[in-house]
Image (tube, coloured by chain):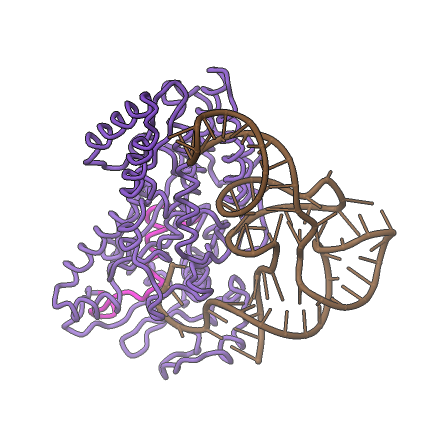
Chain colours: A purple, B brown
Amino acid sequence: MALQLHNTATRRKEIFEPIDAKDVRMYVCGPTVYDFAHIGNARPVIVFDVLFRLLRHIHGAARVRYVRNITDIDDKINAAAKANGESIRELTTRTAEAFHDDVAALGCLRPTIEPRATDHIPQIIAMIEALMASEHAYRAEGHVLFAVASDPDYGEFSGRSRDEMIAGARVEVAPYKRDPADFVLWKPSPPDLPGWDSPWGRGRPGWHIECSAMSEAHLGESFDIHGGGLDLIFPHHENEIAQSTCAHDGRPFARYWVHNGFVTVDGEKMAKSLGNFRAIREVLAEVPGEVARYAMLMSHYHDPLDWNEDRLGQAKHALDRYYLALRGVSDIGAAPTGPSPEFLAALEDDLNTPLAFAALHDLLSDLNKADTPADKARLKGELLASGAVLGILQQAPEAWLKGQEEEAVEIEALIAQRLSARAARDFAEADRIRTELAIRGILLEDKPGGKTEWRRAV
RNA sequence: GGCCGGAUGGCAGAGUGGCUAUGCAGAGGACUGCAAAUCCUCGUACAGCGGUUCGAUUCCGCUUCCGGCCUCCA
């Protein structure tokens, strides 16, 4: 089965056909680094990490290029730096590092290229110049603006007419705009703000142009997939399309547009402005990154996902079952097989991770029931290979189940004591030790053959 | 106000024009000194009202409710 993706541009599920199967290219809008990322910001990072892994599986790791930008010039950054009393550079460096730590803990691979807006000012200026030359842009009061009237297709992507945009406008329109929908490509910077020399004076880029310039610089004028959150469809992606296609003489921009739904809290979008957010690092302080990742993938990427304790509990429990089964076959080598066909088919169907989990559960159930070493090796191989595409199940089972247990020696000693008590049929003492350990969060499992395994329950 | 999405069993969450996933929780059983883990069995749910159809949870229309975008936003 071929990979299918829901394409926002056509609002339909389509078979994915890369422009060049030897060089599959994907661009995803990355973070603006002014503060710690929250778990809502983590969703696209995880979702597109899975897509990246899947594309690498299908086309070969060396044949996929994944670009995710870092926006390090922005008014929110300027405001935050001022409020913190630190330089913009300090703030963006510190925040970008924190972002990397956070998403690494969530099991995300580094993108192939991670360009920064401030490293692409020449490309941004060049693109604006091209737009000026073709009269898609104009100067007004120190700004350079994109003229939406010059682009007959403007608004088609997000499905809104210009009349609607004007009627629905809730912001005051700057008086120097030719059209209320025109947006800024370049704006002047006062001396206390970051700025670069340009043909239009010292200034800084508008929000949308950086993605157009960076995708062109690293992936070319036309590429395969462009991803981001649902809230970027308008205006950000609409504007990117307008800028890029107009700067490229109408040649096509991204072919498949993939958008993830929101993380919600009590049914409402998680957002900084609403104050209902959980920082990634807050979540990581409570559960392993793999639990958060699993929890995130329990819903289809396009649907809203409510973030709560119950979801995390379910994810933890599910992962425990997998690692328990893997521990049971730790003495058997995994067969060199790929993911199970059912699992792969589910992921290839527009990244249907819930259905993929169902396939994974089948594998788990079969593994628990398998009684020949050959079957166990094959199922273990399929389980691990499938897990690798989702970015889960790659840890050593013992490490997962026991954690960084500093009291391991003491626990093992208590278990030995209990085994002696059992051998002497002193079950009262055996149960006392079990209870003592249970209070400390250690769960015991007596195995056939007189061996006792243990794991952390919480 | 305009434009998009949603509504599935106690919960999470797929999917399908007829055979009605999967996980959690729950009930019963096997196993166990007791447990845990595992295995077996058990739940006909698809917002409401019309329509199309031999047959609709699945297609169409309307209604209700929820969320999102239209302003920074993943």
Relative to B34, say whether A91 is above or below. Answer: below
Check the picture and name the quadrant holding the C terminus of chain A.
Answer: top left
| Magenta region, residue range | A198-222
Residue B31 point in image, percent of width and height: 50, 25
Residue A80 point in image, percent of width and height: 21, 68
Residue situated in front as seen by the camera: B28 or A30: B28
Q: Which residue is drawn at 29% across and 50% down?
A: A286
Residue situated in front as seen by the camera: A124 or A311: A311
Q: Residue at x 21, y 72 (%)?
A: A189
Indicate whether residue A138 is drawn in magenta: no
Residue B46 point in image, percent of width and height: 67, 57
Relative to A446, say whether A331 is above or below. Answer: above
Residue A18 visible here: yes
Q: Quadrant of residue A78?
A: bottom left
Q: Is residue A99 left or right of residue A274?
A: left
Relative to A164, say whether A16 is above or below. Answer: above
